[in-house]
Amino acid sequence: MHIETLKTFCDLIETGSFSKAATRNFISQSAVSQQVKMLEQRFDRQLIERRQRQGVALTEIGKVFYAECKEILARYLALEERMRDQSAAVSGMVRVATVYSIGLHELPPYVKQFIKAHPHVKVHIEYSRTDKVYEACLNNTIDFGIVALPLRKPNISVIEFRHDKLVIVCSPEHRLARLGEVRFRDLVGEDFIAFERDIPTRKAIDRLFKQHEVAVNYVMEFDNIETIKRSVEVGIGFSILPDTAVSNEVRSKMLVARDFSEGTFTRPIGIIHRKGKVFSSAAKEFVSLLTGIR
């Protein structure tokens, strides 16, 4: 069994197409099919389901095999890099998955700085829901993810990145905008625009309301921060969001941000990756830039 065979298998799963996998590896579709058949025969297990309209889908054991193949390929690439001249420029691609609030408002300065320092590296940012970021880490389809309120899960490692300050956000015409600082009791009964219930930031905010015995009126729930901001702008209600995510709107006076009288509340941001993940030189450099640790 060759490294090339494992790469072909992974390309087939990621493209969902025998023809695209063949093109990526400069072989025929028949050769792709033969390599997959050889793998299934070697382990005496069916790895994929062949579907006429939907391409291919992994079986349960196929999912395990695919994730491990990605790890083997990552280790092989890391070995290749170590065998090259260490003075050579860092190159390759870094794949990062994150949620919109972090990807759009936290990462751009870091990406700009990283690309300037390493012009031969391509940075690919995927925007997704938190659960999908964890899934991508476990499936080894990304180098690492960046999420809010990272959870300690089996097979997932967490690297601390930063903390975001949470602020009360409303339109300039809203009653809360006239207050210098806002007490939790000022929020009682107010219309509130929230993240959807399964999103970690929503759970953290719900805990704050419960701790301070505040009952708000949940009028809307969204899965992304941009829609929440637009709804707050038109006066539907207030929200609680990271200050970095609303800085542009506050500067342009589309929104007003207020601190809590009771103190500063934050949400932790973490870099997550599959345990045992072997980072390429490019991924290592990017993580070092984000954390300031070398």
Image (cartoon, helix red, strand yellow):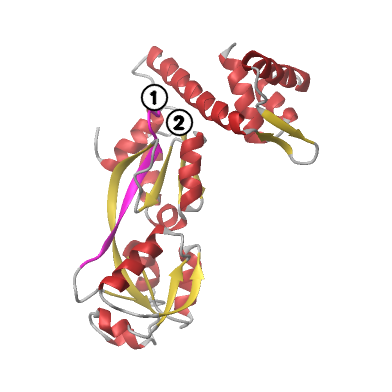
The mark that comes first in sequence, 2 or 1, is 1
Q: Could you tell me which residue is drawn at 38 percent across and 32 percent down?
A: 275
Badge 1 element:
loop
| Residue placed most toward the observer, 188 or 43 | 43
Bin the neighbour count of mark 1 within 10 Å (Cα to Cα): few under 14, some 14-19, many 20 and up: few
Residue 210 vertical position relative to residue 130 in the rendered view, above or below: below
Residue 198 vertical position relative to residue 56 in the rendered view, above or below: below
Choose top left, top right, bottom left or bottom right for residue 213. Answer: bottom left
Determine if residue 123 is in view. Answer: no
Magenta part mainly helix, strand or loop?
Answer: strand
Residue tagged 2:
120
- Residue 164 pos. (x, y %): 29, 59
- Residue 173 pos. (x, y %): 39, 87
Bin the neighbour count of mark 2 within 10 Å (Cα to Cα): few under 14, some 14-19, many 20 and up: some
Separation of residues labelled 2 and 1 (CA atoms): 7 Å
Q: Which segment did they paint magenta?
A: 264-278
Badge 2 element:
loop
Q: Does residue 1 belong to the magenta stretch?
A: no
Residue tagged 1:
89
Which quarter of the figure is the C terminus placed in? top left
Q: Could you tell me which residue is drawn at 40 percent across and 78 percent down?
A: 238
For the residues bearing labels 2 and 1, Cβ distance under 8 angstroms: yes
Q: Could you tell me which residue is drawn at 68 percent across and 15 percent down?
A: 41
- Residue 54 pos. (x, y %): 75, 41
Q: Amino acid at mark 2?
A: His
- Residue 286 pos. (x, y %): 36, 37
Q: Could you tell me which residue is drawn at 39 percent across and 38 percent down?
A: 154
| Residue placed most toward the observer, 59 or 273 | 59
Q: Does residue 274 belong to the magenta stretch?
A: yes
